[in-house]
Image (cartoon, coloured by chain):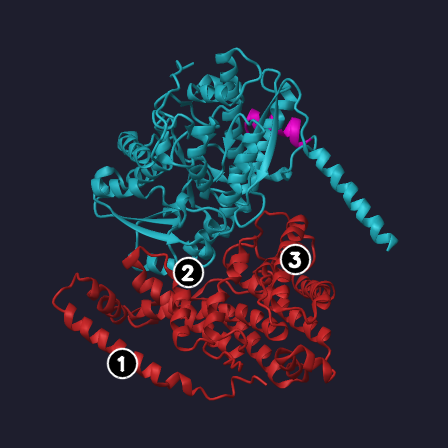
Amino acid sequence: MKTTKLMKGAALGALLAASAQVAPALAQDSVYFANNAYRTGPFSGSGIPIGDGMRDYITMINERDGGVNGVKVVYEECETGYDTKKSIECYEQAKSKNTILYSPWSTGATLAAIPRAHIDKIPILSMAYGLSASADGTNFPWVFIPPFTYWDGASLMVKHMAAELGGMDKLKGKKLGLIHLDAPFGKEPIPVLENLAKKYGFELKIYPVAAADMQNQGSLWLSIRRDRPDYLYNQGWGAMNPTAVKEAIKNNFPINKLVGVWWAGGDDDARAGGPEAKGYKSLNLNAAGTNFPVIQDIQKYVVEKGKSLAAKEKVGENLYNRGVYNSMLVVEAMRNAQKLTGKKVINAEDMRRGLESLNITEARLKEIGMEGFATPTTISCTDHSGHSKAYVAEWDGTKWTKPGDWLEPLKDEVRPLIEANAKDYVEKATGWPKRTEPCEKSS
Amino acid sequence: MSDVAARPAPNLLAKGWVKSGLIFIAVVAAAILGAQFDDSGTLYKVFIDPFQQMVQAPDLLAQTIWEGLVSGVLYALIALGFVLIFKASGVFNFAQGIMVVFAALTLVGLYEKGVPAFLAVILTLGVMFVLAVTIERVVLRPLVNQPDIILFMATFGITYFLIGFGEALFGGSPKQMIADQLWLPKGAIDLKLFGGLVSLQKIDIAAAVIASIMIAALAAFFQYTRIGRALRAVADSHKAALSVGISLNQIWVIVWFTAGIVALITGIMWGARSDVSFALEIVALKALPVLILGGFTSIPGAIVGGLIIGIGEKMGEFYWGPLIGGGIESWLAYFIALGFLLFRPQGLFGDKIIERI
């Protein structure tokens, strides 16, 4: 009896101690930034490297520079397990702690947060994911989707296919297959691909993969064998990607004709295919590797001091660097907001202004140690994406490489669709607030 | 005694089946008549075109059936894990999925620590045995004679414990299954059949063979040994089994350990097809329609159910999927199972439970 009492007491004590530790002490010169993460669940394979990259860049800024212009960034992760329901709890938590920004890290979570954020006045940064139509800043003043949207990605896939075939006119009569996760994220590129298929006369075949069948793609690849598409675009995530790479090899589909969206470009995704995965491609917005001053600073100030959660050899992997890029956007937007408002400690509304006039130039990229790591991006009042360039990365058997140049998406095709779709969204959402936020002059 | 396999199955041919068969034939005949004038009609696409495809490209048909067969055997294996526990403790073991993940991660984790592959398999079996004993001691024993729903909820508890424990031990990053080190074959055998190419993956052949041996061994073990008889007694009534001196605790350890073995094999086979991560947990749920179809208490039901679901969903996805945009296989499995339930509510080989008031 005595021992159980004692144990209960100890457990209670431990609980109290733990809860006391959780509450971060917000000092005067700090801002709070909540980031959704999924280090657990079926998608943790992709979620962990991204979370590590994001966390390490912010830690590096705090350690090396003492924060953004002296303001420490209090970074906290909220675990969602890639579950939209949990992401809403995370949103509410982030709101109650006055986050400067909501970082959903899933398209489902972004869709759920968009209507809330417009009322709560919290900017959403969905970096190269989320609702493509939200690139229309006139209708979505609180949502930002740099450096490009899934629709830009789909247009880049078509462009890549045309480039390999020898011109846009060579697309006629060809077959493009889209393998996609049967979820909001996976379905995003369909309208643009349908549109481009009609315009350029190629045939589009769609192969959805239910989340429950991510590792069970046998019949899908049989259909691919029957239909014989010339190229495959994989809008996949999590365990779906390594399975697709393995199935392509198993089914003798030419691996260099399989192109993943940038989220299908994890090192673990390609590695699953073994040596035969050499030649697998993926669209990309950031460079992989450690050969950049920014990554070396992270190694110096964070990894070597034992302040990172990532294993040493994972630093510099493709998805890790993607996380670094996302955090860079956050920090640069903060700087911009500080400059615009003259305040040091900014709030969510200031942050929105900072994002809306964000202009990351080549010179700025060089200053922050990211020359060649990414391309310049400009966000404006109407264009919340920038529709920036991407490149087609290639797996060489051990790492991702950049064989070609940066490509511009088919902006002229994508932009009218985005505006039409945004108008449609706003009309269907009754009582959607009209934009009242004034436009910023681009900095 | 609920020895189902030995019982003749006259119900299969009972009037309901004949009637529905006739209705089906009539519908097909009417459809053929109605649609033969129109090559693009819906009826044509549903009832004629797929069969024409089958005839025109028999190699693809053979390939589809083969894929279905392999998945079917693998589903049957998972279903067996559920059936054994259901028979012994009357609960649907919600934790089966996470046991697959846990077993596979333990195996790969041990190998990464430098343990030779086959020794790692043996050690993993040891871990699964310890897990079975722990579950029996900590979870099941205190719950003897509690309502089934309490035990069912307890398996939820086991699931969440194993998720947390597994993530703490192994982390959430995906790992590669050590298929080569376990001498699992690679590559494919290409057969020239029906004027086309049917390619049989060696790993699939191995999976089918290993799963079949496992299933046969388990079925024989629980059919013909003393422990098997004791298991069936426990399945009928905990109290009655206890009264004749059967050790409930021992039986529970044995079935949970068996479920652990099944989990390890499932983990190796599915892990080799994709990678080893917590996503493998979902794979176990593919057994649910198999169980609905085959009955929760029948070993032959799990086998036949697995094959019907496996072949049915692949054929459905391949030939009829494109008509409605594809990706139908996950719900088609339930659809097939429910179709059977209309005629046999207790499942294909399930026990008919007659409760008199």
**Which is nearer the eye, A55 or B230?**
B230
Chain identifier, cyan in the render: A
Q: Position of residue A170 (x, y in %)?
A: 23, 42
Callout 2 crowding tier (Cα within 10 Å): few <14, some 14–19, many ≥20: some
Q: Nearer the viewer, mark 3 or mark 1?
A: 1
Circle 3 residue: B106
Q: Residues within 10 Å of mark 3 (few under 14, many from 20)?
A: many
Give the amino acid at mark 3.
Answer: Thr
Question: What secondary structure predominates along the stretch shown in magenta?
Answer: helix
Which quarter of the figure is the C terminus of chain A placed in?
top left
The segment highlighted magenta reads: A291-304
State the residue at coordinates (57%, 67%): B92
Q: Say if residue A317 shows up in the picture.
A: no
Describe the element under mark 1 as helix, strand or loop. helix
Q: Dot 3 lies on which element?
A: helix
Q: Which image quadrant for residue B314?
A: bottom left
